[in-house]
Image (spheres, rainbow, N blue to C red):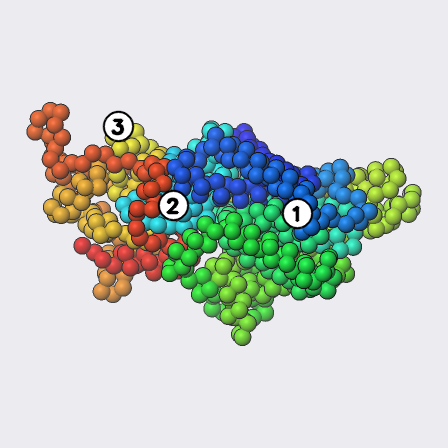
């Protein structure tokens, strides 16, 4: 747990401080800069990794620090530009509202809530893995996406290639075809290897919840602060925001389901979207925030494009419900300011737009369908509105205390006249319900919005839970403010709508807030068993277990392991060989587009190695020296004997398992994990000592950081390594139904 604690601390600092420094240099106040820090940090990572890849620089802590210095210089130039006479005509000094800004008291209240919420999330996610899962922090998540995330962390660290436009070089060892994947979260995490000393699996298991421990409470607090500011002053709104940040850690979706199902980049981007959205809303009153707001939105988008959709919905509903009717300057002026922010954002996210367009042919986001038979409309609405979708509907729904405070919070939002917040909650509750059951004529427009979240119920539930937690925090916070008012009237002077006043009143507020946070911490203790079970559920070794780790360790101990290729069955998840040991498997992930012909041939012809000259030549050409087999396969259709005529893919390694192959010699077995070495039938011994055998190529290593190579490799891969499963299965069948 010491390593885990260190990773959490370093992750928080690396995530917050670079963006905060840049934001402060662009004239944001320290509280706003710190809140926007994570989003701006991700924007810097996105921009720098693409630029470095284009000019041939590697991505590592030193180059990242150089990039930060350059960003600070640009931010300084921006702040100087704002002081020029020409800029003052377009960016006037904000009008003095005579209202105090965010001071020390407000900061302490928010930080206390954020700290408690983050601590609860980190402990709940990491402790069960470290204490109860096999291999501790080296435990392997059994969920599809985790392999890609862990591999990306290692690959970026080893190669220095952090560009989201070059992830195809990792996805397919042989073709290196183009692939766009929003990997900003991975590129930032790769910087932590030398800072923490963690290995890739340890880092993945601790860095994932560490980042969410920062972004989830921060996103919820930002929403709650925005809600509260419709009626309350800064200090009182800060108390409410801190309460919401702490309460967020009690919700099973924030982020325990996302940690279980390894949808971490999506969760990080979505949880930061409220921060970016609230910053965008502020540009109509302070136009100097246009560039930092655009940077924040760009960072959210680069982390995962779904975050951009949430920002757009919040800002759009705010404009329709509030901004249009109460303009800060004028309707045209406010709209023009928002439009300039949008244009700057589009410029900053150009790599995201380019990558998305290039993989558009394999994107079917609006058409993914995860609905289940037998769920009625009322049940679907209840699940969508109150966090009851799969997998929570099985054992963790309903959680009545959370539902009650959420409903009360929605009522308080109506009292606060925060119509945009209510509308946003309602929109995403309907979108989530539509992912569970068809809502008739609303199904298509709701499905179009949900498509950017893969119409996945658990991803959409995460969005609804952010609004629900903010509403619940507002309900509890407003109740505490009212209680403070009652205590103040009884025991001393105080203003019931404000938590500022005399020293005595200040002590009453502080004491009451500390008691409130202590009660929330107690509730977290009660919620720990179910939430910890959710976060660590997929850790039992169903696909990758101790036997697999032993096989990987044996392979890594071989003298030639780092210089050769290992043929593996991608359906079994044996691509974990790479993040665990650094040894290169032919198939590093469960899927990829554009498999080469020779990959297909050797995959389906594994049992013919040593008997088929054509297969043997492919083995030599690709420098394959080991084969690893470890059933079972991930999906049911990938198991059993292949039967293409009847539409059953099956397992091409089954014949090898039953009958062996002349050119393979078993060299390791533990449980069902077996390693074979390619023998002398394929690689005949050299006739003269020191002279290599004919036809044996030199070892092939992983790609360097040369930016030209990415442009030379052709082929189009799908939208990242994490499309919806159904699209993956269709593409996988197209590859697999081509037996030799």
Q: Which mark identifies residue 527?
A: none
Point out residue 142 in the picture as x, y percentages from the top left corner. 42, 46
- Neighbour class for label 3 at 10 Å: few (<14), some, many (≥20)? few
Image vertical order of residue 308 relative to residue 541, above or below: below
Quadrant assignment, res 734: bottom left
Reading the image, the residue beneath label 2 is 166
Label 3 residue SS: loop
Q: Which dot, 1 or 3, sits closer to the camera?
A: 1
Point out residue 704 in the picture as x, y percentages from the top left corner. 33, 36
Q: Which mark identifies residue 87?
A: 1
Front-most of residues 42 and 495: 42
Reading the image, the residue beneath label 3 is 559
Relative placement, left or right, of 1 versus 601 is: right
Relative placement, left or right, of 624 versus 703 is: left
Among the two numbered marks 1 and 2 on one chain, the one whose residue lies closer to the N terminus:
1
Point out residue 211 in the picture as x, y percentages from the top left corner. 55, 41
């Amino acid at each position: 747990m010491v390593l885990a604690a260190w990773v959490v601390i370093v992750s928080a600092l690396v995530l917050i401080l670079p963006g905060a420094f840049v934001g402060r240099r662009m004239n944001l106040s320290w509280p706003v800069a710190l809140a926007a820090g994570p989003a701006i940090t991700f924007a810097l990572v996105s921009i720098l990794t693409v630029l470095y890849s284009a000019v041939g620089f590697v991505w590592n802590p030193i180059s990242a620090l150089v990039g930060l210095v350059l960003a600070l210089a640009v931010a300084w130039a921006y702040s100087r530009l704002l002081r020029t006479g020409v800029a003052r005509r377009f960016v006037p000094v904000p009008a003095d509202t005579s209202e105090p800004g965010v001071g020390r008291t407000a900061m302490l209240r928010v930080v206390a809530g954020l700290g408690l919420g983050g601590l609860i999330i980190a402990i709940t996610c990491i402790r069960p893995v470290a204490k109860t899962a096999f291999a501790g922090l080296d435990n392997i998540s059994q969920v599809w996406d985790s392999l890609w995330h862990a591999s990306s962390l290692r690959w970026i660290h080893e190669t220095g290639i952090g560009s989201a436009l070059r992830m195809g070089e990792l996805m397919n060892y042989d073709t290196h075809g183009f692939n766009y994947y929003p990997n900003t979260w991975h590129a930032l995490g790769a910087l932590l290897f030398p800072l923490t000393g963690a290995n890739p699996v340890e880092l993945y298991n601790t860095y994932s919840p560490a980042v969410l421990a920062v972004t989830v409470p921060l996103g919820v607090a930002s929403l709650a602060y925005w809600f509260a500011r419709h009626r309350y002053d800064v200090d009182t709104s800060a108390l409410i925001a801190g309460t919401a940040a702490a309460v967020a850690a009690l919700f099973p979706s924030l982020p325990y389901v996302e940690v279980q199902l390894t949808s971490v980049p999506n969760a990080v981007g979505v949880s930061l979207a409220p921060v970016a959205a609230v910053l965008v809303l502020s540009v109509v009153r302070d136009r100097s925030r246009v560039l930092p707001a655009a940077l924040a939105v760009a960072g959210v988008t680069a982390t995962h494009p779904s975050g951009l959709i949430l920002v757009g919905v919040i800002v759009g509903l705010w404009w329709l419900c509030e901004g249009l009717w109460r303009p800060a300057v004028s309707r045209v002026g406010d709209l023009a300011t928002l439009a300039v922010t949008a244009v700057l954002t589009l410029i900053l996210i150009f790599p995201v737009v380019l990558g998305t367009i290039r993989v558009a042919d394999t994107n079917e986001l609006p058409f993914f369908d995860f609905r289940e038979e037998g769920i009625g409309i009322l049940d679907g609405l209840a699940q969508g509105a109150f966090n009851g979708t799969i997998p929570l509907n099985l054992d963790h729904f309903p959680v009545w205390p959370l539902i009650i405070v959420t409903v009360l919070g929605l009522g308080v939002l109506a009292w606060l006249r925060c119509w945009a917040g209510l509308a946003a909650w309602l929109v995403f509750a309907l979108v989530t319900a539509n992912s569970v059951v068809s809502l008739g004529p609303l199904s298509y427009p709701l499905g179009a919005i949900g498509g950017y979240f893969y119409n996945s119920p658990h991803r959409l539930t995460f969005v609804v839970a952010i609004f629900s937690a903010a509403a619940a925090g507002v309900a509890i916070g407003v109740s505490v403010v009212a209680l403070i008012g009652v205590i103040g009237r009884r025991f001393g002077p105080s203003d019931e709508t404000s938590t500022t006043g005399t020293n005595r009143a200040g002590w009453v507020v502080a004491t009451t807030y500390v008691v409130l946070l202590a009660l929330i911490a107690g509730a977290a203790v009660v919620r720990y068993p179910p939430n910890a079970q959710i976060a660590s559920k997929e850790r039992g070794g169903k696909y990758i277990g101790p036997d697999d780790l032993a096989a990987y360790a044996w392979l890594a101990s071989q003298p030639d392991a780092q210089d050769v290729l290992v043929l593996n069955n991608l359906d079994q998840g044996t691509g974990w060989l790479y993040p665990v040991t650094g040894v290169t498997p032919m198939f590093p992930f469960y899927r990829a587009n554009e498999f080469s012909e020779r990959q297909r041939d050797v995959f389906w012809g594994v049992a013919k190695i040593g008997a088929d000259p054509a297969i043997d030549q492919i083995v030599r050409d690709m420098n394959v020296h080991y084969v690893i087999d470890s059933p079972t396969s991930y999906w049911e259709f990938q198991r059993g004997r292949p039967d293409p005529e009847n539409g059953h893919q099956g397992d091409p390694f089954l014949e090898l398992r039953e009958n062996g192959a002349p050119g393979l010699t078993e060299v390791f077995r533990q449980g069902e994990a077996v390693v074979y070495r390619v023998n002398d039938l394929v690689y005949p011994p050299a006739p003269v000592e020191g002279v290599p055998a004919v036809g044996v190529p030199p070892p092939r290593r992983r790609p360097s950081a040369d930016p030209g190579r990415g442009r030379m490799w052709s082929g189009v891969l799908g939208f990242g390594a994490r499309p919806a499963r159904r699209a993956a299965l269709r593409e996988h069948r197209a590859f697999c139904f081509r037996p030799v």
